[in-house]
Image (cartoon, grey):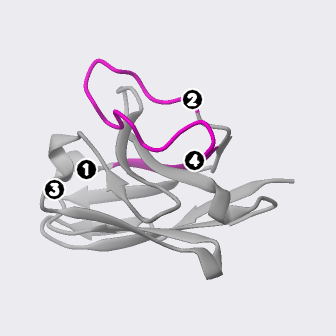
Amino acid sequence: EVQLQASGGGLVQTGGSLRLSCVASGLSFDDYTIGWFRQAPGKEREGVLCITTSMTSTTYADFVKGRFTVSRDNAKNTVYLQMNSLKPEDTAVYYCAARSRRYYSCSDFGRRGQGNPRMDYWGKGTLVTVSS
């Protein structure tokens, strides 16, 4: 059974930082592209950052620029999302998801109007709350 477990969410003040982790099991991790998504209350799910198996990160999401980074440790089957300078509008449930690199390598990730890519597996999400 494939599982993606996101963790590291919590309550943080404006300007603070959090590092989310996504641990995968049941799949050949280094064959999968991993994407981070988020969904705020009353809003659609949106792409945050994507990372390929060759460690290349991609996003067209403007809100990420200069604040969030993504990395992966294939030896630990883990992808990290480092979030700095957090704002109240970053409050959301954050999800990680995986898709085989054979079919997806982060193209157009987070581009407005493009829609989210179809992912093979999703984690349950971790809640991030940023207080003002």
Marks 1/4: CA distance? 19 Å
Question: Which label's residue is closer to the chain start, 2 or 1?
Answer: 1
Q: Is mark 2 on a helix, strand or loop?
A: loop
**Which amino acid, mark 2?**
Arg
**Which amino acid, mark 1?**
Asp
- The residue nearer to you, when weighing 6 against 132, is 6
Is disc 2 in contact with disc 1, using a CB cutoff of under 8 Å?
A: no
Q: Which SS type dominates the magenta stretch?
A: loop
Question: Which label's residue is closer to the chain start, 1 or 4?
Answer: 1
Marks 3/1: CA distance? 5 Å
Q: What stretch is highlighted in magenta?
A: 92-118
Question: Which label's residue is closer to the chain start, 4 or 2?
Answer: 4
Residue 12 x, y percent position in the rendering:
27, 69
Question: Which label's residue is closer to the chain start, 2 or 3?
Answer: 3
**Residue located at (49% from left, 30% from top):** 117
Residue 100 x, y percent position in the rendering:
65, 45
Q: Name the residue under label 3.
A: 87
- Which corner quadrant of the image does residue 9 belong to? bottom left
**Which amino acid, mark 4?**
Ala
- The residue nearer to you, when weighing 87 against 63, is 63
The disc placed on residue 118 is 2
Q: Is residue 99 left or right of residue 59?
A: right
Q: In the figure, 129 relative to 118: above or below?
A: below
Is disc 3 in contact with disc 1, using a CB cutoff of under 8 Å?
A: yes
The disc placed on residue 97 is 4
Marks 4/2: CA distance? 9 Å
Q: Name the residue under label 1.
A: 90
Residue 50 x, y percent position in the rendering:
41, 50
Q: What element carries label 3?
A: loop
Residue farthest top in this picture? 113
Q: What element carries label 1?
A: helix
Marks 4/3: CA distance? 23 Å
